[in-house]
Image: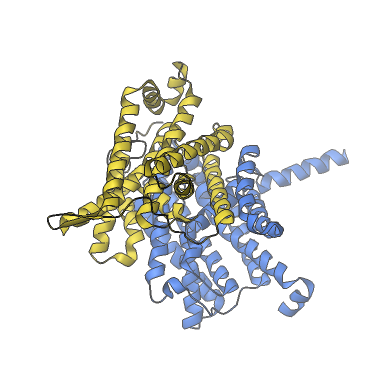
Amino acid sequence: MLLQQIINGLTLGATYALIALGYTMVYGIIQLINFAHGDIYMIGAFIGVAAVALFHQNFFLTLATAMLACVVLGVTIERVAYRPLRRAPRLNLLITTIGVSIFLETFMTVLKGPQPTGFPTVLENVTLRVGTLEFSSIQLVILLVSVALMVGLQFIVKYTKIGKAMRAASEDYDTASLMGININRVISFTFAIGSALAAAGGVLVGIYFNSVSPYMGVTAGLKAFVAAVLGGIGNIPGAMLGGLLLGLAEVFGVAAGFSTYKDAIAFTLLIVILLVRPTGLLGRPIQRKV
Amino acid sequence: MEQWLSSVIDPYYQQVLMLVGIYIIAALGLNLITGLCGQLTFGHAAFLSIGAYTAAILTRDFHLPFILSLVLGGLMAALFGILLGIPVLRLTGDYLGIATLGFGEIVRVAFTNMKITGGAIGLAAIPRASNLINVTFFVILAVAAVVLLENSRFGRALKAIREDEIAAEAMGINAMWYKIQAFGIGCFLAGISGGFYAHLLQYLNPNDFGFLKSFEILNFVVLGGLGSIPGTIVGTTVLTLAPEFLRFVQEYRMMIYGLLLVLMMIFRPHGLLGGVNFRRLLRRRKQKATALSS
């Protein structure tokens, strides 16, 4: 029973982690809370729905299409809406992300209507049994895909040239640009990766809960953001840890009888962690300087 | 009096004007916290809802007079603001914003699950007690109060904290104490605004006070010009009226609103009236007058 809940929690947590990574990478480099990120996740899910019909129920092609389309979307948004404001006061940039978020949500509502729609079957749902343990094949796919994507991300960040540039930019933005790193390219790339992961999350969650709606990105985005803060915003392993922790906390909270307060669990955890460790579990402490 | 008013102004315009006034009260509170004191908060709607529910329950179930329940609602919001502020105001910058955002969501979920607030169905049949006269009266009162506060020792301390907290503390300003006071006053104004809101729409639903509402109020303040009281008033008016004027585009309304937000931030990065305050406005008028007379 306990193991069962852990599996459920990890599945939920893996999807939070996928979205949280986008928040944390962008924050790490330009200190921006990108509130439109949850809506990229939503758009990814909708593109997934469209792609299923196009590719005759091929799961991997569906996933790849959604990811690719969201890469284009994410990079375009950054180029058009965020880049002109890079030297503006930070609060303005924040409000711009909210403007983009409202725009995307209404756009999808106009296009598809506000009601949730189901996700066409793309994966066969088989219940697997290992001893007393029961889990669906969809859960297994979610876990496997998420782990594969996160390993891939770690590889990019640790061992490629652009990954090194990303790390340098998150260490010190101005110095990195003085060292000849093309900062605009790094930022575009960060948005590209973040959007791709969010789109993957969107497709996986759409399949898991069999529901896609224009407002699905609001709560999921906020919670993923909480996950990023829990782990220490700006810290990539932190986002993964935060996502998994949050998923576990929610599943166990519901199991303990707080189901009506499910959405408050994440935020209570957030405030408690912020008070005990103001920069999250794996975050570096802020230094106060004059 | 009210009958006379509705013969002069169309009831629909009255409703819109009252909404503008109500949001001005809330935005002035947020301007005090974020604009003047520099403390980022993303949970202002939570205090609006605390004030709204308190005032609504007091008039609806306990038949208290409107103005009294309004003030009690404001005090309740201030109390929660101070209780939240004491632990949370130690955080700085984005982290404070995030924590208040979390609090806002907790309040929303709590109201959805409480019995006395009507839960997810909402609280209906609230008597209609807001009218253009008492709203206008409170707006004037609130503007006067924040203008006086801004130009007092208290306001200068807040500005010092905004510019540099460590330097302010070195000057002997108890930053924590001032921040909590600013937070309390800001939340009080939000609570008052919420009370009017409840007695205008006569129906409350927890989902009306989500984080988007908090950001809406933040937009008012930033669009007008952070820290500027005339700016806050102009920003609130423009952004509250914009969706009303955009009604002709129907379902594209919010899309255009979002687009407008992005464009305004790109082309007016310091807000419509960034850095303008009443004193400077008066001085400019005086200069113009002397230039004309000479």
**Residue B91 or B117: which is nearer the viewer?**
B117
* Residue located at (60% from left, 43% from top): B262
Q: Which x, y percent locates residue B143?
A: 62, 58
Q: Which one of the lettered chains is coloured yellow?
A: A
Q: Is residue B4 left or right of residue B274?
A: right
Q: Is residue B17 left or right of residue A45?
A: right
**Residue A232 or A216: which is nearer the viewer?**
A216
**Residue A211 or A222: which is nearer the viewer?**
A211
Q: Which of the 4 image quarters holds residue A143?
A: top left
Q: Is residue B60 above or below residue B171?
A: below
* Residue located at (60% from left, 63% from top): B22
Q: Which x, y percent locates residue B57?
A: 47, 77
Q: Which one of the lettered chains is coloured blue?
A: B
Q: Is residue B275 visible?
A: no
Q: Is residue B246 above or below residue B173?
A: below
Q: As drawn, which residue projects farthest toward the top?
A: A179
Q: Is residue B243 left or right of residue A205?
A: right
Q: Is residue B93 above or below residue B106?
A: above
* Residue located at (53% from left, 60% from top): A114
Q: The C terminus of chain B lies in which quarter of the figure?
A: top right
Q: Which x, y percent locates residue B31?
A: 55, 51
Q: Which x, y percent locates residue B97?
A: 43, 48
- Colouring method of the image: by chain
Q: Is residue A191 visible?
A: yes
